[in-house]
Image: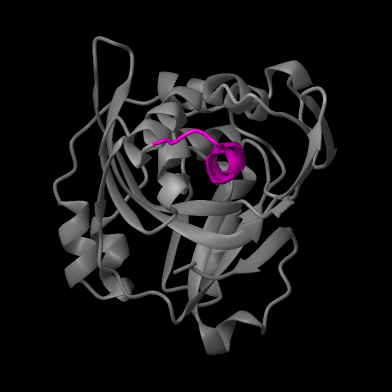
């Protein structure tokens, strides 16, 4: 069986508060995009994982896919091969998506009856954004990232350029270097009521200041995307990838001097 886990972008990311638990309250819009990893899953007598593509620096025994197998507690074993295409440490949710797609697969082939709520509970235990990828639709995300509501934004006719500076940012380090601050504007209201050309007046990603210091090239990339006519440009997640949203007729004109991906929002 082949699985194709997709990435996501954040449109707006406000870090509102740090809780006593150490977690942060956020406000963001998550949008699934057409950039994919590939997972091959085969029945086996042992659980075994191999990888190719983008290098995964952590010990393979700590990989999030092993956590899925452990948390799901299936009575079946699998040989899994993960081919990484989604950049790592990029703010695109690739690892969480890999996990969520494997969990959906395990539920599909399982002889156990597992409710949607229980699957979401397992996803939340596995990784912070995993529950989003279980449903894999545009969502307005609040709280510690687990409260998700539908959001009505019309950007399906737009194309998106993702630029990867190939300098990963550690999410924990990014959170350590941010000062929580409530936004002046309610993100959902802006996204549903303002034209995309006005988003930059109201929408921000609180991680940009840290990311731009950490990866000096990002400021130059953002300026380039805006110069080339993007309707909206932002860091995704805690970085280090940055994206520009363009009209369809604009996107194929440009060859960017960085590793880049031309994608769409997935409906």
Residue found at x 51% / y 65%: 244
Given the current orientation, which residue lies at the most extreme top position?
Answer: 20
Q: Is residue 59 visible?
A: no
The answer to whether 186 is drawn above or below residue 144 in the figure is below
Instruction: Give the x, y percent position of residue 162.
Output: 60, 60
Could you tell whether 131 is left or right of 169 in the image? left
Q: Which residues are magenta?
A: 94-114
Which quadrant would the C terminus be assigned to in this image?
bottom left
Instruction: Give the x, y percent position of residue 193.
Output: 17, 71
> Is 180 or 222 nearer to us in this picture?
180
Main SS of residues in magenta: helix
> Is 227 or 236 nearer to us in this picture?
236
* Residue 60 in which image quadrant: top right
Instruction: Give the x, y percent position of residue 43.
Output: 78, 37
- Residue 158 counted in the magenta span: no
The answer to whether 77 is drawn above or below residue 97 in the figure is above
* Residue 105 in which image quadrant: top right
* Residue 76 in which image quadrant: top right
- Residue 103 counted in the magenta span: yes
> Is 58 or 72 nearer to us in this picture?
72
Q: Is residue 178 visible?
A: yes
Residue found at x 32% / y 62%: 200
Residue found at x 28% / y 55%: 203
């Amino acid at each position: 069986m082949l699985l194709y886990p997709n990435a996501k972008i954040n449109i707006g990311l406000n870090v509102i508060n740090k809780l006593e638990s150490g977690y942060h309250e956020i406000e963001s819009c998550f949008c699934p995009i057409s950039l994919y990893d590939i997972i091959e899953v085969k029945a086996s007598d042992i659980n075994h994982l191999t990888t190719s593509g983008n290098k995964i620096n952590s010990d393979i025994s700590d990989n999030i896919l092993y956590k899925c197998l452990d948390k799901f507690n299936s009575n079946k074993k699998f040989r899994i091969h993960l081919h990484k295409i989604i950049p790592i440490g990029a703010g695109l949710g690739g690892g969480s998506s890999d996990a969520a797609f494997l969990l959906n697969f395990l539920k599909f082939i399982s002889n156990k009856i597992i409710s949607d709520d229980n699957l979401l509970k397992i996803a939340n235990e596995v990784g912070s954004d995993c529950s989003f990828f279980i449903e894999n639709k545009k969502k307005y995300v609040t709280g510690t990232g687990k409260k998700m509501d539908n959001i009505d934004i019309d950007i399906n006719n737009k194309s998106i350029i993702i630029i990867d500076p190939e300098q990963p940012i550690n999410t924990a380090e990014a959170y350590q270097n941010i000062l929580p601050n409530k936004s002046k504007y309610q993100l959902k209201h802006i996204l549903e009521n303002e034209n995309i050309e006005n988003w930059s007046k109201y929408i921000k990603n609180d991680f940009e200041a840290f990311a731009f210091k950490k990866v000096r090239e990002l400021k130059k990339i953002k300026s380039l995307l805006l110069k080339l006519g993007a309707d909206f440009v932002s860091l995704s997640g805690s970085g280090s990838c940055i994206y520009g949203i363009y009209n369809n007729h604009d996107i194929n004109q440009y060859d960017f001097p960085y590793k880049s991906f031309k994608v769409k929002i997935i409906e």
